[in-house]
Image: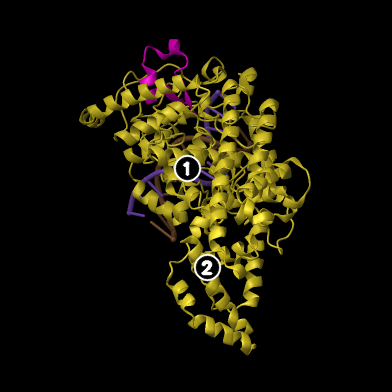
Chain colours: A yellow, B brown, C purple
Amino acid sequence: MMEEGCKNSIGEGEIMETPERSKNSRIASSIAKFEDSPVFNFLNNLSPIKPVHFSQTINPLSFASLPSVFSSPQLASLRESRLLRRHSLSDPSKPEFSSDPSTRASVNLDEQRENLDPNFKNDGEPSRLANCESSIEKSNEDVLGTCAALVEGQRSVNMSEANVDVLGNANVNSWDSLINDASNLLAFESPNAEAYNKPVDPATAFYRSIRNAIQNVCGERGNAAEDMPCQPDGEIENENLSGICRGMRRRCLVYEMAGGRRKRVEDGSADTPLLLTTSGSASSDKQTARTNTENDCYRILPGIGLHLNALAATPKDFKIFNHESSASGRLLIGPSSSANFRQDLLRNYSLERENDALENDGFVMEDHSWESGHVANEDINPSSPKKRRRRSEQGGDGESCKRCNCKKSKCLKLYCECFAAGVYCVEPCACIDCFNKPIHEDVVLATRKQIESRNPLAFAPKVIRTSDSPSEIGGDDLTNTPASSRHKRGCNCKKSGCLKKYCECYQGGVGCSINCRCEGCKNAFGRKDGSCASAAEHEHEEDETDSISLYNARIHDDLDSQQSHRSFSKKRPPRAPFPPIGSYAFPPPTNMRPRCEEEDEMPHFLVGGGSPIKTSSPNKKRVSPPQTLPGLRSSRKLILQSIPSFPSLAPSQ
DNA sequence: GAGTTTGAAACT
DNA sequence: CAGTTTCAAACTC
């Protein structure tokens, strides 16, 4: 059907070309004859091409980051110019200029097929092409498998180096090499003629190896591989990989959503890489259909652990993050765009794999890295309709991305959620005079450094796990309750009763502790005085006894699985490294350790002595969030992921 | 959408 | 360290 559709499409394409040559009556006449031919009619009756299929075919890895690549300014302009070129040659009324993406995709498909096989049009051998496409797809799968092996290998490395800075040299080398490979895979599809033609650099070598593999599969096509679908358009300007990387820089913090699907525990999702997805422009992103599905979104995880600042955005949006949205574009603050790019490649690759797992098993363990209390909060405090409305107002599917509205801080203070979360502001932000943008990277980094000099933990997660010190827990079965996590500094609420999101503890989904200086604490997650929830909450609690039991059970299960997973090299790699954040002055000074679920262990420098963290659990009994499973999951997430990783801070603590 | 409330962050 | 101011999110109307 594909080949037929293609044939049909091409036939139409030729027809469509005719108006341009209307001056040539001879040609017009030929075309008229062709249109009247039975073959033409037959072709016309064939089903249209499914552009998506082709898109997937040429996107073997389906990296979620691809969209970003294509949405990068450079490439966007390239695409634009390409469109313009075609436009100048054809009648705007033709399908290829249709606003209908599918139509356009079809045309592009034709065009790419022509590139793929210059003889396609003339010799009319669609079946051969189809075979080749199929083979290419198969080859791509092989490539994907290879990449999977690479990633898996890297995971193993990371597993064995669980406590080693992911950005450490050893890993960096390994990751670099791996990601370079992935980058090359990406280059495979990039319109980057220069990168393609550049001889002998490792990236090119890898790319060519892929090309050769595909060529082998499509052997009969001879040198067709030289004209792969990814073959850059002739008009495309030369761009090196770094250029692509630049296009990848816009990233979204992915805020997972409470209602997200539950990931399979067995797959070690606990260490799901931080899936900081690239977002790119929505339109182009949609072409990477699979990676842009809702399924993907919920697995994309923010890279900031439980930093409350970032967390705040989670409940705020409470929607499955849709990295497809350009509105949600988010660029992590960091000096190395290429590093970010590579990390994204891996993250997105992991995402893809998770996707596969989901599709295959239909059950993927949910990573709640960010929902934590938010989920619960949202449920508990469903004042959210308004919030949701507000968020939707702010940007549709990109809701899950943090957007600030800073007006005076220039987004260079912790007031700014974006800044505090370690991400650059993006278009959807309503900030004014924003300096939290890549172009002001120096300023951003300097400011962050300054803030950190004032408070080294300023960018550290605010909600931390305190269950690592059982002796200080006071017998509380911390592992069973959200109480095992605490706001590291405590809140200072006076009027909200710690029942609104003004309260960072509440917002973080944790109970107040003796660290808190709150007044009239009624925190549903646990009061400062350790008392139980209010009477009303008790009633609610009783109503949900079963839910709480289930909740506790789940927590146990999660913890158990978490424990067991740690010993498995099979486990996913630690959450992908948070892109280097130069401003994170933690030694090593220029790199912020990725906050990964792997590192749930609260660094003792935080748990132990110098930390203001309360390890004691004032609440023997914790009130389960007034929701059942969603809340439970969220709580679990909080426990599992609220662990910051700032080992380098240990000395100061 | 505008205005108010709130508490963290920043400042003194 | 405490008090005050600034700020932006959360919230209300």
For the residue pair A358 and A440, the one nearer the viewer reads as A358
Q: Name the residue under label 1.
A: A313
Amino acid on which the number 2 mark rests in the picture: Lys
Q: Which class describes the residues within 10 Å of circle 1: few (<14), some (14-19), or many (20+)?
A: many
Above or below, comparing residue B5 to residue A595 in the picture: below
Q: Which of A497 and A358 is in front in this view?
A: A358
Instruction: Name the chain letter of the residue that bears numbered label 2.
Output: A
Q: Residue at x 62, y 82 (%)?
A: A20
Q: In the shown orientation, is residue A574 left or right of residue A201? A: left
Depth check, front residue: A424 or A24: A24
User: Disc 2 vs disc 1: which is toward the camera?
Assistant: 2
For the image shown, how many numbered marks are present on the structure? 2
Most extreme residue toward the top, as rendered? Answer: A471
Look at mark 2 in the image and give the residue it sits on: A7
> Which residues are drawn in magenta?
A463-487
- Magenta includes A492? no
User: Is any part of residue A97 visible from this angle?
Assistant: no
Q: Which chain carries label 1?
A: A
Closer to the chain start, of discs 2 and 1, is: 2
Q: Which amino acid does label 1 sit on?
A: Ala
- Quadrant of res A108: bottom right
Spatial CA span between label 2 and label 1: 49 Å
To the question of a shared chain for discs 2 and 1, the answer is yes
- The residue located at (36%, 51%) in the rendering is A386
Q: What element carries label 1?
A: helix
